[in-house]
Image (tube, rainbow, N blue to C red):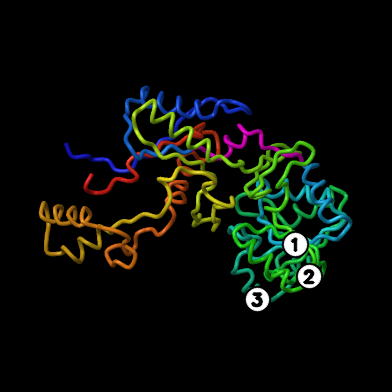
Amino acid sequence: MERRVGTVSRGVRCPIIREGDDLAKIVVDSVVEAGEYEGFGFHDKDVVAITESVVARNQGNYASVDAVAKDIKNKFGEETIGVIFPILSRNRFAICLKGIARGAKKIVLMLSYPSDEVGNALVTMDMVDEAGLNPYSDVLSLEEYRKHFGYVKHEFTGVDYVEYYAELIKAEGCEVELVFANQAKTILNYTPYVINCDIHTRARTKRVLYANGAKLVVSLDDILTESVDGSGYNTKYGLLGSNKSTEDSIKLFPRECKELVLDIQAQLLERTGKHFEVMVYGDGAFKDPQGKIWELADPVVSPAFTDGLIGTPNELKLKYLADNDFKHLSGDALKEAISNSIKAKQGSLVGNMAAQGTTPRQLTDLIGSLCDLTSGSGDKGTPIVLVQGYFDNYTN
């Protein structure tokens, strides 16, 4: 019988994961038991995805604010530190800033405006226009910022991040000066010692700063790259991808976890006879049309995945075929013609007009975004996601 369902994404419940648990076994047991309990089977190329937070928790990859402070102190000594381009987030950055401030004597905090890198707005672009400012060139002091915009609370959190970050720094006994600018080199008018906190543009920012005379530039992925007094760490990403755990600790992005996904893949094959693909996922990569927030605050969507998830989709656009190549057909004849086109596709479809409008993104970014939306970030209790039928097409 012809299949009537395409891609299905299921959140899978599992026990609360603790440090040292046999995570691979828990994931496999949870997926297999979900199939038995809910009455669905498995297929080759099904995808099992695990949220990065439970992987990091299982690794015990946590660090204290004091550990961050000590790393900062070791790197910068008594110098005034320019902290530039942080995202506006109580969960993602405030706890990192607390550690940075604890390890510094003075911080010059430079915020981008009207919004941060991932779309969190200090103010709206309309407000910038009304003030007659050019955000690409105009540099504002705190007094000038308040004169133009006053106190503006974030639409979703109700927080004035300017005040919030400034008070957080002061609470650590650290002096603070605020600057609002969008050119990285602006900070060098205040100090040649810089922590650039941007995520996806960090390499360029560091290059620009050094090219303009910076003495030391440290990105978030340079902080806690090794253990400090027994703390967690991440050799590749440092503080990038971290989240607040408690008022005085941070959960870091999981360390190397390729072995984990390969172990889960092997156990699933043994238990079900099917070849699964497996990945670890964090933030999805999509934009909220209301808040204008681009979700991806992690350095990557997926820090580890099996080899079958390498690459991008290679698909034909059905509506293009129906409206162009086979516009004279309908019914079974149209269905057969489109099916034959899909079966006949070979090699890369890059440049093929019939592929225009398909999504040219990495498979892990697409599937990870689907998983992030499926599991949510609250109390659903489904840190494992099973995606079925993703690699099917119209002919399956």
Please give left or right for residue 315 compared with residue 263 in the image.
left
Residue sitting at 48 percent across and 43 percent down? 305
- 6 relative to 382, above or below: below
Read off the magenta span.
Answer: 50-64
User: Of discs 3 and 1, which sits in the foreground?
Assistant: 1
The answer to whether mark 3 and mark 1 are in CB contact below 8 A is: no
* Residue wearing tag 1: 217
Residue 212, image x, y percentages: 74, 74
* Residue wearing tag 3: 134
Q: Which label was assigned to residue 188? A: 2
Residue sitting at 73 percent across and 39 percent down? 63
Q: Identify the secondary structure beneath mark 2.
A: helix
Q: Earlier in the sequence, mark 3 or mark 2?
A: 3
Residue 223, image x, y percentages: 73, 50
Q: Is 391 contained in the magenta span?
A: no
Residue 330, image x, y percentages: 12, 57
Figure quadrant of the N terminus? top left
Residue 371, image x, y percentages: 46, 42
User: Of discs 3 and 2, which sits in the foreground?
Assistant: 2
Residue sitting at 64 percent across and 49 percent down? 236
Q: Earlier in the sequence, mark 2 or mark 1?
A: 2
Q: Amino acid at mark 1?
A: Val
Query: Which of these two is toward me, 300 or 244?
Result: 300
Query: Which of these two is toward me, 49 or 170?
Result: 49
Q: Identify the secondary structure beneath mark 1.
A: strand
Q: CA distance from mark 3 to mark 2?
A: 20 Å
